[in-house]
Image (spheres, rainbow, N blue to C red):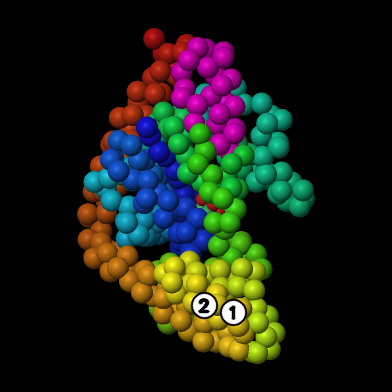
Amino acid sequence: MRVLSGIQPTGRFHWGNYFGAIRQYVALQSHPDDAFYFIANLHALTTVRDAAVLREYTYNAALDLLGLGLDPGKATLFVQSDVPEVSELCWILMTVANMGLLERCHAYKDKKAKGVAADTGLFTYPVLMAADILLYDSDLVPVGEDQNQHIEVARDLAGTFNHLFGETFVLPKGYILPDSAKVVGTDGENKMSKSYNNTIEVFEDVGVMKKKVMRITTDSRPVEMPKDPNTDPLYQLYSLFASREKASEMAELYRKGGFGYGMIKKELAELAADYFAEARERREVLAAQPEKVREILGDGAARARKKAAEVLLRAQTACGIKG
Ligand code: ADP
Ligand code: TRP
C-alpha cells in the first residue's frame, strides 16, 4: 500500500503544519516504496513569485522535514518539479476535467468570491494535485480536512479516465485528519495559518518563540475564576506538547481557578522548546551538509521517477498517445 502526501513550500513550517500534517507523515513511514512525500513547489508557484525565495523555502522544507523525522531509509522524499512526468500527466487529466468540477473547488471559488482575479494555475491546481496522487498509484493520502475536496477531484478524474480508456489509475483514498486536530493560532481564535499571521514556526529562534508564546491572546477573566480547559486556546496549545499527566494536572488547575495565564505560557514555551530540541539538532547537523540533502532529494526523485514513468506510460498507452 502506498501512502503519499505533499506539502507546499510557501514559508517555514509552523506548529499547525507539524501537528496537522508532518507528524502523521513521520508516523506512516515504514519503507521507501510505501511512503512518498514531496515538496510541492509547482503548487507554490501559484503564490510565491520570487525565484530566490521559492528556492530557499524549498530547501528549508527539505531540511525541516528531515529534521522532524522523515527518514530517507523509510520514505521517499523528493521535490515535485524533479519529476517532470507530473506535468504531462496533469495535461492528460485536464482533458477529462470538467469545468464545473473545478469551478466548485474552494481555492478558486473563494478568490473569485472576493473579486480577486485568479490565474489558470490556481484554477487547475486540483488537477495538478490529482496528477501528483495518480502518478504513483497512491492508495492513501493523509491530509487536513481542507484538502478533502481535492482528493475527491483526484478520485473523480481517475474514475472518468478509467471509464473512457479502461482501468488505468488506482482510486486513492483520503486519510482525513479530524477537525479536532486543528491547531489554533496565537490570536486564540483562528486556525494557525500563514494567511492569518498567527503562527509559531517549528524551528523559530527559541527566544522569538518564547516572545510569541507570551503574546498569545487570552481572555481577561480574573485569576480566581475557574475556567473550562476544553474551550481555552492556550490550554489546547499546551496539551499538544504536555504529557498526558501534565495535561490533566493543568486541566484540573483550570477547573479550580486561581492562576494567571503567564505561568502557563512560560511552561508552554519551555515544553515546546524541549519538544523540538532533538529535531532542531538533527536539522542543524544536516544544514551543515547541503550536499547530503541534495543527495537525499536526488535519490528520492530517482525512485519517484521510476514509478512515475511506469504509470505515465500506462496512461499514455491507454489514451493513444503512445504505443
Ligand atoms: P497555511 O494555512 O499556513 O498556509 P498550509 O495550507 O500550507 O498551511 O498547510 C499545509 C498542511 O498543514 C495541510 O495538510 C494542512 O491541513 C496542515 N495544517 C495547516 N494549518 C494547520 C492547523 N492550524 N492545524 C492543523 N493542520 C494544519
Ligand atoms: N494542496 C496541498 C496543500 O496545500 C499540497 C499538495 C499538493 C498535496 N499535491 C498534493 C497533498 C498531493 C496531498 C497529495 O496542503
Q: Amino acid at mark 1?
A: Tyr
Which residues lie in the magenta part? 150-172
Horizontally, residue 92 falls left or right of residue 288, namely right
Q: Which residue is mark 1?
A: 254
**Disc 1, SS:** helix
Is ligand 1 less than 8 Å from the beta carbon at label 1?
Answer: no
Residue at (53, 70) in percent of width and height: 237
Q: Which residue is mark 2?
A: 250
Give the total of numbered labels. 2
Residue at (50, 55) in percent of width and height: 20
Residue 282 pos. (x, y %): 27, 64
Compared to residue 66, the image places residue 86 above or below, namely above
Residue 165: which disc?
none
**Mark 2 in CB contact with mark 1 (< 8 angstroms):** yes
Res 18 visible? yes
Q: Amino acid at mark 2?
A: Met
Specify the quadrant of the image occupied by residue 121: top right
